[in-house]
Amino acid sequence: MRDSTVTQVIPNAAAPPAYVNPPVIERVATLHAPMTAEVFEANIERWKQKVTPEYPAEEPLIEWLVEMEEKDGVPLFDTLAPKLRITHRFSKKTKAEGFDWSIRCPVGKFTMNMHSQPGSGRRYDHLRKEFAKWLPQWMEHFGVKRAELLNLGYINVLRRDVTPQFFNKDGGLELDKVLRVFSEIPGKHESLEPPYDCRVTVNLGNAPAKKLSIRVKDATTPANGVAIKVTLETLAQVSGEGGISEVLELLDWSHERIIERFEQVFTDEAKASFTPEAQ
Amino acid sequence: MILTPTTGPTLHSAEAVASDSAYVKKASEAVAAAKPDQGRRLKYEFERELLPLEGGQVLLHLRNRLMVDVDPATMRCGVVEWGVSLPVTEVADLPNRLARQFLTLFSKADRDSLDQAESDQWLRIIDQVDYRRFCIDRAAPQYVEGVVETKQPNFVRVRWYDDSVEKIDFPVASALNVLKKGDEFGAYVKLGLGNKAMSIERLTILSAA
């Protein structure tokens, strides 16, 4: 009687699915913490000295904002308050060179952006490593003792040059072949057209608060033609008792939730086009 | 369903649907739809309460937020009362320009060399900043002598040469770490509002306890 050996392959449930060419173009992590304007302004110049050796391109973000209060749905023009906001921003490449990694430092916020393109090989782990390197320095430099909120955002873009198989000969994007959400609109029509902007926020738990939002918006430009931007973003409350390790654990948790939703938002056909990696 | 490029008129530009369900155009939509008046200067509130001087070692506290004028015809912006104007494309440098203008006029005022126009401008500027606080923050450290009365883990109590007693909290008090109760010392002390010690440096022991 021959012995037979059976090898059972057990999928690694802990490993999230990964793709060779995911459509993600930017990953953004932001930590919010209490900070006074005095502490910020007294320390920002020395922070610049610390950051610029690795992030030499200093290009502040300029925002010309218009805010107005509404009462019972009526805009109150006497509350019209146009504002100019200048936010410190440091990156490894200038905007003209196409941006690459950046750190934004408004009062009480530390934001790190990692840019990528399909096939660039950049992963969440790269963002996490850089975030884990700079966050403790930022907290120590500005005397931050307690974190409040953590955001993680993934911005995915589908364009003809990235996923040509989902575009027809007229340049239209076959949404239902790509997305499981916001693609089936009830009623009879020939096609969808911009403006196309759908957003939902789901509650993942209270105390501490955890939320996730999914936004699908057309990102059509004359140069690139029809495109859509799919943004997945989490917001999580930090208890503040666990220090840096709590923030990083929460960042990992946020990443897992985004990956879960990514799997559910995109169709199998779309995910196959992103070239799954062998597990 | 296919998402196609826009053809013909778009819903972006169309008027709101004529609904009886009391649709009121949102404030942001009303502003966005307004046609810019090229001849009118636009005013924006500068979202900043402080201007850093000397690399943030001295902070200029603004009493109210400054208003930035934008001239759409020339695409220049600036703060008129401060005599600062620059191209919109260089607006990121505005805090530096304001700080430089303040120090320029402050230095001239200190030398008594302001002309009439600059003098008027200087008066308008100091009306908009906490000038007293600036003067205190900017003052050089003074040499003072004192005696350590009490040392606690989170503060040190000092009796100064003029017999006033001050409880100095950490981290300012960390400069006195090497001293013991009863030590007489001299040091250069930077004083803040209410003559409170903001920093202590160049410590010398005059008489050990």
Image: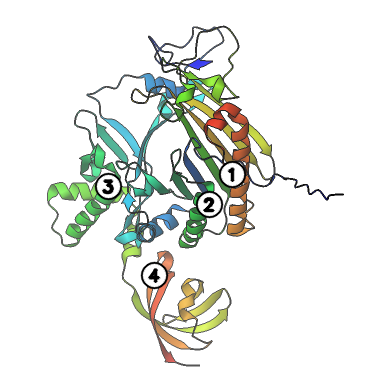
Task: Identify the secondary structure beneath mark 4.
Answer: strand
- CB contact under 8 Å: marks 2 and 3: no
Q: Position of residue B109 (x, y in %)?
A: 19, 58
Work out whether residue B38 or residue A75 is closer to the camera in this orientation and state it.
B38
Specify the label residue B93 is tagged with: 3
A109 w.r.t. A228: above or below: below
Label 4: chain letter = B
The label nearer to you, 4 versus 3, is: 3
The label nearer to you, 1 versus 3, is: 1
- CB contact under 8 Å: marks 1 and 2: yes
Residue at figure coordinates x 32%, y 50% from the top left? A57
Label 3: chain letter = B
Residue at figure coordinates x 75%, y 47% from the top left? A7
Q: Amino acid at mark 3?
A: Asp
Is residue B59 something one can see in this rendering?
Answer: yes
Task: Identify the secondary structure beneath mark 3.
Answer: helix
Q: How far apart, in angstroms, are the residues tagged by discs 2 and 3?
A: 32 Å
Work out whether residue A19 or residue B62 is closer to the camera in this orientation and state it.
A19
Residue at figure coordinates x 58%, y 33% from the top left? A213
Bin the neighbour count of mark 2 within 10 Å (Cα to Cα): few under 14, some 14-19, many 20 and up.
some
From the image, tell me which residue sits under label 4: B191
Q: Position of residue B59 (x, y in %)?
A: 35, 57
